[in-house]
Image: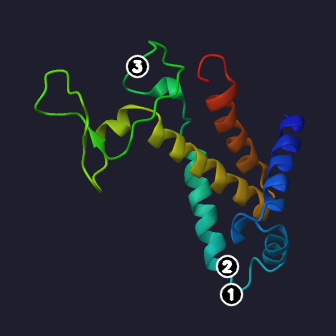
Amino acid sequence: MRKLYIILTLIISFSLSAHAQWLWDRNKMEKIKIDIKSLAYSNAYKSLIRQADKALSGGTYSVTYKKSVAPSGSKHDYVSLSRYWWPNPDKNDRMPYIFKDGQSNPELNEYDRNLLGTMCGAVNTLALAYFYSNDERYAAKAIELVRTWFLDEKTK
C-alpha cells in the first residue's frame, strides 16, 4: 500500500508542475498549505474537506457499471455519446441522431461519459484534500477509484 501512496504523491507532484490552472500551481499550493487555517483559506479548506469526506463515503466508478452495453458487446469498452445529438424520435431505429443545441442527451447517463467525469472530479478532490491535510484516507480512496476504473480486471 505504501507504494501506491508514493505513486499518488508522484502523480500529484507531476500534476503540480504543470501550470494548466492556478489550482495546481505547486508554489501557490505550498503557500496556501502553510496558511491553510487563515481567514483567507479556512472556509475553502473546510469545503474541500467536506467534499472529500463525501467522496470517502461514496462508492467507486467503473465502465462496467453502465446501464447499457457497448456496441462491441463488452461492458469493459468505454462508450461516450455526443452530448447534443439525440435519437431520432421519427425513426424506428432512432437513426440518424438529430442535433439539439444546448440540450444534453439523457442517454449520456446510460454510458460512461458522465461517470468518468464524476470519478475524475472525486479523484481531484481527494488528491487536493490529501495534499492539504496529509490525511492518508483521501489518498487511499483516490487510489481505490483509479484502480477500479483502470486496473482491476473485473472493472477496468
- In the picture, measured across the screen, residue 134 lies left or right of residue 47, that is right
Residue 13 x %, y %: 85, 55
Q: Position of residue 12 (x, y in %)?
A: 80, 53
Q: CA distance from mark 2 to mark 1?
A: 6 Å
* Residue 10 visible in rendering: yes
Q: What's the CA distance linking mark 3 and mark 1?
A: 49 Å
Q: In the image, which disc is placed on residue 1?
A: none
**Where does residue 58 sit, x and y in percent of width and height?**
53, 43
Assess whether mark 1 and mark 2 are in contact (beta carbons under 8 angstroms).
yes
Q: Nearer the viewer, residue 126 or 14?
A: 14
Sequence-wise, the earlier of marks 2 and 3 is: 2
Identified by mark 1, the residue type is Leu
The residue indicated by pointer 1 is 39
Q: Which mark is residue 42?
A: 2
Mark 2 lies on a secondary structure that is helix
Residue kind at label 2, given as amino acid type: Ser
For this orientation, the residue located farthest to the top is 73
The disc placed on residue 69 is 3
**In front here: 53 or 66?**
66
Residue 100, how many percent across, how many down?
24, 49
User: In front of the other: label 3 or label 1?
Assistant: 3
Between the C-alphas of marks 2 and 3, the distance is 45 Å
The residue depicted at 80 percent of the width and 75 percent of the height is: 28
Considering only vertical position in the picture, is 4 above or below 129? above
Give the residue at x 79% y 60%.
18
Q: Is residue 2 above or below residue 28?
A: above
The secondary element bearing badge 1 is classed as loop
Question: Which of the 4 image quarters holds residue 152?
Answer: top right
Q: Is residue 67 left or right of residue 65?
A: left
